Amino acid sequence: MLKLSVLIPTYNEDCSRLVRDLQAQLPTDAEIIVGDDSPPHNLGRSARRNALAEEARGEWLLFIDADAEVRSRSFIANYMAACSQAPVVCGGTGNLPACPRPEARLRYDYEVRAEKRLTLQHRQAHPYDGFTTFNFLIRRDLFLSIRFDESLKHYGHEDTQFGLELKKRGVPVLHIDNKLTHLGIEDAADYLRKMETSLRTLASMSVEQKQNVRISKLALRLEHMHLLGPVRFVYSVSKSLLRKNLLGHRPSQVLFAFYKLGYYICL
C-alpha cells in the first residue's frame, strides 16, 4: 500500500502547474489523482471527493482544491512529519499578496479578512470550527468511515458537515502552518451567486449542523431577541443598494456581512 495519495477534485480547471509542483516533492510511495467533475460526469462535490478516496491506494489522503498554489518546498514533508501526531491534519489557506483585478475585490477582501481571523492559534483553539476541504490530510480508513455527505448536491457546507462528524466522534484534528495559496478569486457577481447557493444549502441543513456555522448562530440569536423582522425589513428595502456596493470596485465587508445575514433569514 502506498503511503500517500494526493487527491485533487476539479471542475474544468487546469491544475497542471499544481500537479507539477507537488510531483517535485512527492516520495516514491505516493500518487496524485485528479478527478474531473465536468458536466458529462456531474457527480457533485461530495460524491467526487468520495470517489477519489475509493480509488486511492494511499494510507493517507491529502485533499487539495484545484485552485491552489504550492508556496513551500517542504509542503509535503511538513504533512508527513505531522501525520504521526493526529489522524487529521489541516494546513490552512493563504491568499495572493494583492487583489488580482478590480472586479474580484469583494472575494479577495473577504478571504484576506478570513485569513487574519483564522490564525494558527485560533484554528488550534477551535479545531473543528471552520473546517475546510481546501487543504487537509486524513487517514484513508477514517475518511471512508465518514465520507462527505452526498445528499448535499449544491455548493457549500459539505466541509461543515464533515467537521461536525469529526467533532461528534472525538477525532483529534491537528492544525499546522502549512498553507496553500488560494488562486480561485471570482469576480463579485460570480461570488455572490456562489454565496447565495451556499446559504440555501445551509438553510436546508439540520438544526445541529446550523449550530456550527456563524451566520446561522447569529440568526438564531436574533430570533430569540425578536429582531428577525426588523432585520428582514431593512434588508428587503436596501437590497438593491447593497448589491450595487458589493458589485462595485470598493465593496464594504460590513455591508457584505449584512447582505448575507439578510439573504439567509429571508429564505
Image (cartoon, rainbow, N blue to C red):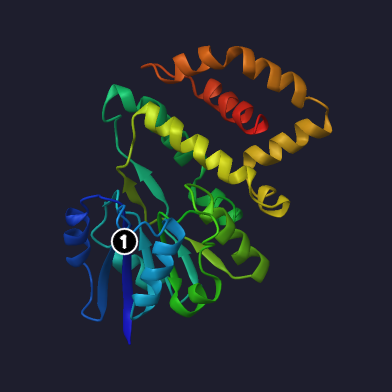
From where the camera sits, is residue 176 visible? Answer: no
Residue, disc 1: 8
Q: Quadrant of residue 238?
A: top right
For the residue pair 228 and 72, the one nearer the viewer reads as 228
Q: Quadrant of residue 255?
A: top right
Give coordinates of residue 179: x percent, y percent: 36, 53
Q: 157 or 38, which is in the foreground?
A: 38
Residue 225 falls in image quadrant:
top right
Q: Please state the horizontal and vertical placement of residue 163, each as a whole percent of the image.
A: 57, 59
Residue at (79% x, 32% y) in the render: 223
Quarter of the picture holding the C terminus: top right
The quadrant in which the N terminus is found is bottom left
Q: Is residue 17 visible?
A: yes
Taking the spot 72% from the left edge, 50% from the top edge, the residue there is 207
Instruction: State the image coordinates of residue 226 (x, y, percent, origin top left).
Output: 83, 27
Q: Secondary structure at mark 1?
A: strand
Identify the residue at image location x=41%, y=33%.
191
Taking 42 as reference, is 143 above or below it? below
Total labels: the figure holds 1
Give the residue type at disc 1. Answer: Ile
221 on left or right of 158:
right
Compared with 248, 11 (above or below) is: below
Instruction: Indicate whether 221 appears above or below 181.
Output: above
Mark 1 residue crowding within 10 angstroms, few (<14) / some (14–19) / many (20+): many
